[in-house]
């Protein structure tokens, strides 16, 4: 018995050491190119470079990592490039802002499904909605939303996942609003809210910390209303510690209606929000990439969540620790995105194409 | 406030911040010199290094680099007529003709001096006007931005050279070009011909390089000789003459500083048009206009002052309200995020010393950058006396690399080539190109601001906002000045923005092309939803009528000119040489598709030297190897450019 156990342990140990050696050998003296699907200097680029900077030390063989940008067509150009032109050798790794809405809407420009890639991991940020206190008839707490009257909603563009979520949120609550898209960045939304051109909008935790917080909330011009929490497989909200004190959207809905939200609009909201919060930014390699490369890269991605240097830099940027999603969870979410019910796709398409 | 200013200065000149600042300046100068590279590229290269630095040294590094890219971008603008960055487009209109007169050194002297003065004064002006900044920025919402962009378009009259009709057609065509791709508010792509590449719209740099740099390249290759048409011995006035020019035009420098700083302050409009506005102002306010476009130093002074002063202006709303005044400032916001610095009203109160530290950084960087460039300006200007044939491969390399760094897509080169043909036809045909660029740059801002305005405000109530009314008044004044100038027949009022000696055949072809473009642009607008199609329709309807009128006038003129059966292509041999050069350029594109840029570009250099200039084989080989090293070290390793995925390897 003891002998058998020893042999089993030895076998497992040798297998592990073989795998580790194979991984170490794979990236030894090699260079990885991290491809970013947006231009230099934006949030996606900054985050990708931060990840790239720390990922290298967790990859067996300690390869050199360089970062390249390939902007275009809302991130689709680089996504197609990963499918069409990149060798499946594990030497080009995508860290992309995922074209989630294009996948939901089956955008013809996207020549690959997101499920056609091998996923390494993902990360994202929760979205919080705010309103100016002098909107409509005035508002000092979320309950007043039922009597506030109409206001302007500052949106980015019809097909933005943030726009879709904020519109669905207000539609579900039955609040009257005037949708004004065209503000191309959170800083433009910040300007519009400061100028009282728009009174309601939503933004990521980054926008709240760096723009809406110091300019609108802290000076007492606006209040946070709710944030869109990730909903688990049992239909429960997964609370985010970084936003303690702010209710989730479901909580607000339940308070207004006496029952939790449901139906196609809420399903669409949940699906899009879960994708954005867990994998607004995702990392992948082309299908056919050698297993040892994939294993090595996945291990590096997972190691980031316990890397104190990476966490410190990330925290300086967002005032909160990173929430990294592992490969299997991302793969699972991607499958949900590509296998949507036709009713849901039609519903979202109608919403974004309505004038 | 004085204490905060002093404290800010101490933070910047303390070690290691000052060391990082100076290093940033050196990198920024290099980036500005190479067309296509700009502060944005610098930001992305340096950002990872700033993660571990304290806020002041980190931002000293980034701002120091960023401040001077618009100082050194003058070099390519003046020497080759290639805008070094998108902020120096207007500089080429007079800067390059100065180089052709052998006055590159004088242009550098003036440009570097005013860049420093503009950069420093811009920072000072804004430091002093901090109390006014908040109400000003908060008042300038989308209706005011729309009106300001209309005001920007009114300088078309000033930029139109000898024909306001052709200028207007070019401006409308420029607006039309800006509608390509997704509207920022719509879900329907426009004029994309089924391509993915055009979904984001036409990229600015390849369009501008095509319109301006390619025709200059053709001139250099076809006419032979050096860039300077005046022998070196006969050139009067050098670097110091330029410095004196800058001092003599102090009043223009001050006004251009104000234009730069306050346009930079306006969120959403910012740096994209400030050089054009300053250039237009220089012409409008000048009594003797006849030399503009022919190498008038004032045409260099105005935009170069403004594009440096603008950076201080763009900085204030960025730090104070998180409202970036220009695209680069949006990137700077990212750097703030990394440093845990949240822009907000506190930056003008409790953290005022930090804000002053940023402004001191801008001021010091501008001063040091200009000083360093003045030291090498004399040597740089010698390039204009080298043989044109020697320069053709070098300029081609920079044009192609500049275009490629836009989005690293073969589409960038196709756009470059197409607009090269358009630019050549417009130049030869006397159709002014500056209004086209102005329309192209202002178009998206104007359309987006109007869209938001009509959706966020009830009816036409926004038109009665006091600032809108004031800007509307300014528009009328600007239009009146433009009309007055065009109705004056005296020679002093004529501006040679484009050659008055235009080729009637080419002119007719260029106008015909613009008419066809306008009709094609108008056709689909009727089937589009109102929000997507309204503005293009309003642009193309007058464009069709105006270009039809210009075409009929052109045909009439054509028949007047060629009454006795003369050759309608008097420059047939020149056209042949242009076509030859075109084949070379097409060759670069096709060879790149086959084997990639790292081989195609050095191969082009070697073959050109071997077959056209007939240098020895070892010179050609050494040049090719040098080019490959340059591409590999700077573009591949350092900047991380994505090359074309070649078919063969």
Image: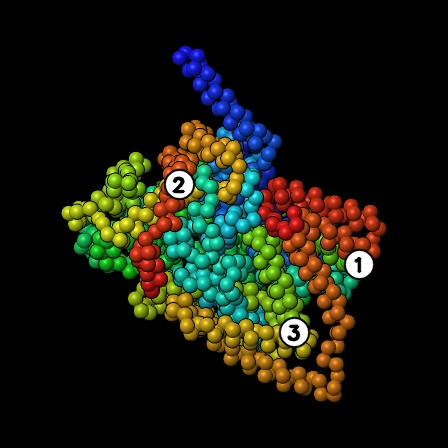
* Residue B550 appearing in the image: yes
- Residue A94 vs residue B456: left or right? right
- Residue A96 lies, in percent from the top left, at 46, 45
Say whether mark 1 and mark 3 are on the same chain.
yes
Q: Which mark's residue is nearer the viewer, 3 or 1?
A: 1
The residue lying at 41 percent from left, 72 percent from top is: B527
Q: Residues within 10 Å of mark 3 (few under 14, many from 20)?
A: many
Q: Chain of mark 1?
A: B
Of residues B375 and B563, which is closer to you in this image? B563
Q: Chain of mark 3?
A: B
**Disc 2 marks which residue?**
A330
Quadrant where the N terminus of chain A sits is: top left
**Disc 1 marks which residue?**
B612
* Residue B316 appearing in the image: no
Q: In which quarter of the view is residue A24 placed?
A: top right
**Disc 3 marks which residue?**
B429
Q: In which quarter of the view is residue B205 placed?
A: bottom right
Reply above or below: B120 against B286. Answer: above
The residue lying at 56 percent from left, 39 percent from top is: A89
- Residue B258 lies, in percent from the top left, at 50, 56
Instruction: Tell me if label 3 and label 1 are in contact, CB under 8 Å.
Output: no
* Local secondary structure at mark 2: helix
Q: Which mark's residue is nearer the viewer, 2 or 1?
A: 2
- Residue A39 vs residue B643: left or right? left
Q: In which quarter of the view is residue A332 placed?
A: top left
The residue lying at 73 percent from left, 45 percent from top is: B626
- Residue B413 lies, in percent from the top left, at 61, 58
* Local secondary structure at mark 1: loop
Q: Which mark's residue is nearer the viewer, 2 or 3?
A: 2
């Amino acid at each position: 018995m003891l002998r058998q156990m020893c042999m089993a342990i030895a076998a497992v140990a040798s297998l592990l050491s073989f795998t580790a050696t194979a991984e170490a050998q794979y990236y030894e003296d090699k260079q990885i190119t991290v491809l970013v699907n947006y231009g230099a200097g934006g949030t996606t680029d900054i985050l990708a470079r931060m990840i790239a900077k720390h990922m290298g030390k967790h990859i067996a063989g300690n390869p050199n990592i360089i970062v390249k940008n390939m902007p275009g067509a809302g991130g689709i150009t680089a996504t197609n490039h990963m499918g069409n032109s990149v060798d499946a050798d594990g030497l080009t790794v995508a860290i992309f802002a995922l074209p989630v809405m294009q996948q939901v809407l089956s955008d013809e420009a996207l020549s690959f499904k997101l499920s056609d890639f091998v996923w390494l991991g993902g990360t994202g940020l929760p979205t919080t909605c705010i309103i100016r206190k002098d909107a409509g008839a005035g508002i000092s707490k979320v309950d007043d939303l039922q009597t506030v009257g109409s206001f302007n909603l500052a949106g980015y563009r019809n097909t933005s996942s943030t726009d879709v979520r904020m519109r669905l949120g207000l539609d579900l609550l039955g609040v009257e609003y005037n949708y004004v898209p065209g503000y191309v960045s959170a800083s433009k939304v910040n300007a519009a809210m400061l100028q009282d051109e728009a009174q309601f909008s939503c933004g990521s935790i980054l926008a709240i910390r760096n723009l809406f917080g110091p300019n609108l909330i802290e000076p007492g011009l606006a209040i946070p209303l709710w944030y869109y929490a990730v909903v688990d497989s049992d239909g429960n909200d997964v609370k985010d510690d970084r936003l303690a004190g702010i209710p989730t959207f479901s909580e607000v809905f339940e308070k207004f209606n006496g029952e939790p939200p449901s139906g196609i609009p809420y399903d669409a909201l949940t699906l899009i929000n879960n994708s954005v919060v867990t994998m607004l930014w995702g990392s992948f390699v082309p299908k056919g990439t050698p297993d040892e490369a994939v294993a090595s890269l996945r291990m590096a991605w997972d190691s980031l969540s316990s890397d104190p240097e990476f966490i410190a830099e990330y925290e300086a940027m967002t005032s909160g620790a990173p929430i990294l999603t592992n490969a299997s969870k991302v793969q699972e979410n991607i499958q949900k995105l590509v296998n949507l019910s036709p009713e849901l796709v039609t519903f979202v398409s109608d919403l974004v194409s309505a004038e | 406030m004085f204490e905060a200013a002093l404290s800010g200065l101490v933070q910047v000149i303390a070690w290691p911040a000052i060391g990082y600042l100076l290093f940033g300046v050196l990198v920024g100068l290099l980036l500005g010199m190479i067309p296509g590279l700009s502060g944005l590229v610098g930001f992305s290269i340096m950002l990872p290094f700033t993660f571990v630095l304290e806020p002041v040294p980190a931002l000293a590094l980034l701002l120091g680099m960023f401040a001077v890219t618009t100082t050194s971008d003058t070099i390519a603008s003046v020497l080759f007529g290639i805008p070094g960055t998108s902020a120096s487009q207007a500089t080429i209109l007079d800067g390059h003709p100065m180089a052709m007169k052998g006055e590159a050194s004088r242009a550098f002297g003036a440009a570097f001096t005013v860049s420093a003065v503009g950069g420093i004064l811009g920072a000072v002006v804004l430091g002093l006007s901090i109390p006014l900044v908040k109400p000003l920025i908060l008042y300038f919402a989308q209706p005011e931005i729309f009106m300001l962009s209309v005001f920007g378009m009114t300088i078309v009259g000033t930029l139109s050279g000898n024909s306001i009709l052709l200028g207007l057609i070019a401006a409308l065509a420029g607006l039309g070009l800006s509608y390509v791709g997704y509207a920022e508010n719509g879900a329907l792509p426009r004029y994309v011909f089924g391509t993915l590449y055009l979904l984001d719209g036409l990229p600015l740099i390849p369009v501008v390089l095509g319109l301006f740099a390619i025709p200059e390249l053709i001139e250099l290759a076809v006419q032979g000789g050096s860039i300077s048409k005046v022998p070196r011995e006969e050139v009067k006035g050098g670097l110091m003459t330029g410095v004196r020019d800058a001092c003599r035009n102090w009043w223009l420098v001050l006004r251009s500083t104000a234009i730069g700083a306050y346009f930079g302050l306006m969120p959403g409009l910012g740096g994209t048009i400030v050089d054009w506005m300053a250039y237009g102002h220089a012409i409008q306010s000048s009594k003797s206009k006849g030399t503009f476009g022919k190498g008038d130093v004032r045409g260099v002074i105005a935009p170069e002052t403004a594009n440096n002063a603008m950076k201080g202006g763009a900085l204030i709303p960025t730090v104070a309200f998180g409202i970036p005044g220009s695209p680069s400032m949006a990137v700077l916001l990212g750097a703030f995020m990394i440093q845990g610095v949240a822009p907000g009203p506190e930056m003008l109160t409790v953290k005022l010393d930090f804000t002053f530290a940023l402004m001191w950084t801008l001021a010091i960087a501008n001063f040091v950058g200009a000083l360093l460039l003045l030291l090498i300006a004399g040597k740089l200007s010698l390039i204009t006396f080298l043989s044109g044939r020697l320069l053709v491969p070098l300029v081609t390399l920079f044009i192609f690399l500049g275009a490629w760094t836009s989005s690293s897509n073969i589409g960038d080169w196709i756009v470059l080539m197409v607009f090269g043909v358009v630019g050549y036809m417009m130049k030869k045909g006397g159709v002014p190109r500056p209004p086209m660029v102005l329309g192209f740059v202002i178009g998206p801002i104007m359309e987006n601001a109007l869209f938001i305005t009509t959706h966020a405000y009830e009816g036409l109530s926004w038109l009665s906002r006091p600032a809108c009314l004031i800007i509307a008044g300014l528009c009328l004044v600007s239009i009146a000045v433009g009309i007055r100038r065009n109705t004056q027949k005296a020679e002093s009022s004529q501006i040679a923005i484009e050659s008055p000696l235009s080729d009637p055949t080419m002119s007719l072809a260029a106008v015909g092309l613009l008419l066809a473009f306008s009709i094609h642009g108008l056709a689909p607008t009727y089937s589009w939803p109102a929000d997507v199609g309204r503005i293009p329709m309003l642009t193309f309807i007058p464009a069709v009528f105006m270009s039809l009128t210009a075409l009929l006038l052109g045909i009439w003129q054509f028949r007047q000119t060629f009454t006795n059966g003369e050759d309608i292509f008097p420059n047939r041999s020149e056209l042949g040489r242009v076509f030859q050069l075109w084949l070379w350029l097409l060759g670069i594109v096709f060879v790149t598709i086959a084997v990639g840029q790292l081989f195609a570009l050095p191969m082009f250099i070697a073959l050109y030297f071997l077959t056209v200039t007939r240098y020895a084989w070892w010179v050609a080989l050494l040049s090719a190897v040098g080019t490959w090293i340059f591409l590999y070290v700077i573009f591949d390793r350092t900047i991380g450019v994505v090359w074309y995925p070649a078919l063969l390897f």
